[in-house]
Image (cartoon, rainbow, N blue to C red):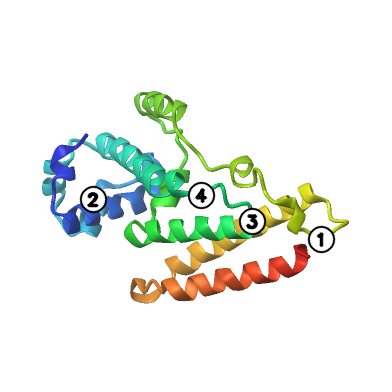
């Protein structure tokens, strides 16, 4: 645990973390630049290395930090007793958007390849992956209320089509957020778009 970084004033800490998340998410560990991270976070490289010991330590800290945040502020808050698939997916989006407000690159970083050119880092990541939770297709689409779907539809194929649509929504929303001017995050507008998509899908699949 990088205590000097954790104990920083929140605004400065988040500036460093978000700059590092963006750099690692877009370039991977090997190509990421600590010069860019320092510049983007508004501090000198020397001061940044006062808070973190090395690029490796910062990367591993971010991996653990993001894992904890996603577990505590996303996975643990999902209500899987909700059996309407569209309500469940909507809940997932709401939780993800809350995280994106705080850390815009957290999900891209979470997806970044865990294979680096460093055997030492790969070994540490391999250990961390053993106990890592994930919200996969099987989890999200488990115990869904089939009675809501129109008769004659193939339920398994319907779930797959909804999943593909969901992936498309997610990628489009993330792309739109990345291109926002002045980082204007219009939460209500995004939710309204999502609700519009789900309403159309309900018309297609539900009675």
Which quadrant: the C terminus? bottom right
Residue 35: which numbered mark, if any?
2
Badge 4 marks a residue whose secondary structure is loop
Badge 3 marks a residue whose secondary structure is loop
Disc nearer the start of the sequence (3/1) = 3
Mark 2 or mark 4: which is in front? 4
Disc nearer the start of the sequence (2/3) = 2
Q: Label 2 vs label 3: CA separation? A: 47 Å
Disc nearer the start of the sequence (2/4) = 2
Using residue 171 as the reference point, say whether residue 28 is left or right of it. Answer: left
Is disc 4 in contact with disc 3, using a CB cutoff of under 8 Å?
Answer: no
Task: Find residue 142 and report its horizontal and vertical position in percent.
Answer: 64, 43
Answer whether residue 167 is visible to the viewer in this image.
yes
Quarter assignment of residue 131: top left
Residue to which mark 3 is pinned: 84
Answer whether residue 26 is visible to the viewer in this image.
no
Disc nearer the start of the sequence (4/1) = 4
Mark 3, Cα crowd under 10 Å, few <14 / some 14-19 / many 20+, is: some
Residue to which mark 4 is pinned: 79
Badge 2 marks a residue whose secondary structure is helix
Residue 8: which numbered mark, if any?
none
Is disc 2 in contact with disc 1, using a CB cutoff of under 8 Å?
Answer: no
Task: Find residue 123 and report its horizontal and vertical position in percent.
Answer: 39, 23
């Amino acid at each position: 645990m990088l205590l000097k970084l954790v104990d920083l004033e929140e605004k400065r800490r988040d500036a460093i973390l978000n700059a590092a998340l963006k750099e690692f998410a877009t370039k991977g560990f090997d190509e990421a630049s600590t010069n860019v991270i320092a510049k983007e976070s508004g501090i000198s490289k020397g001061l940044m290395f006062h808070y973190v010991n090395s690029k490796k330590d910062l990367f591993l800290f971010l991996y653990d930090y993001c894992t904890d945040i996603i577990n505590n502020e996303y996975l643990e808050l999902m209500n899987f007793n909700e059996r309407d698939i569209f309500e469940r997916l909507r809940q997932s989006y709401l939780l993800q958007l809350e995280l994106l407000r705080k850390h815009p690159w957290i999900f891209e970083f979470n997806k970044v390849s865990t294979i680096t050119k460093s055997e030492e880092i790969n070994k540490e990541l391999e250990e961390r992956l053993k106990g890592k939770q994930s919200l996969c297709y099987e989890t999200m689409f488990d115990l869904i209320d089939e009675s809501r779907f129109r008769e004659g539809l193939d339920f398994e194929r319907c779930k797959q089509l909804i999943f593909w649509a969901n992936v498309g929504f997610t990628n489009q929303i993330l792309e739109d957020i990345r291109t926002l001017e002045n980082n204007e995050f219009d939460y209500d507008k995004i939710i309204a778009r999502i609700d519009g998509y789900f309403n159309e899908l309900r018309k297609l699949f539900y009675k």
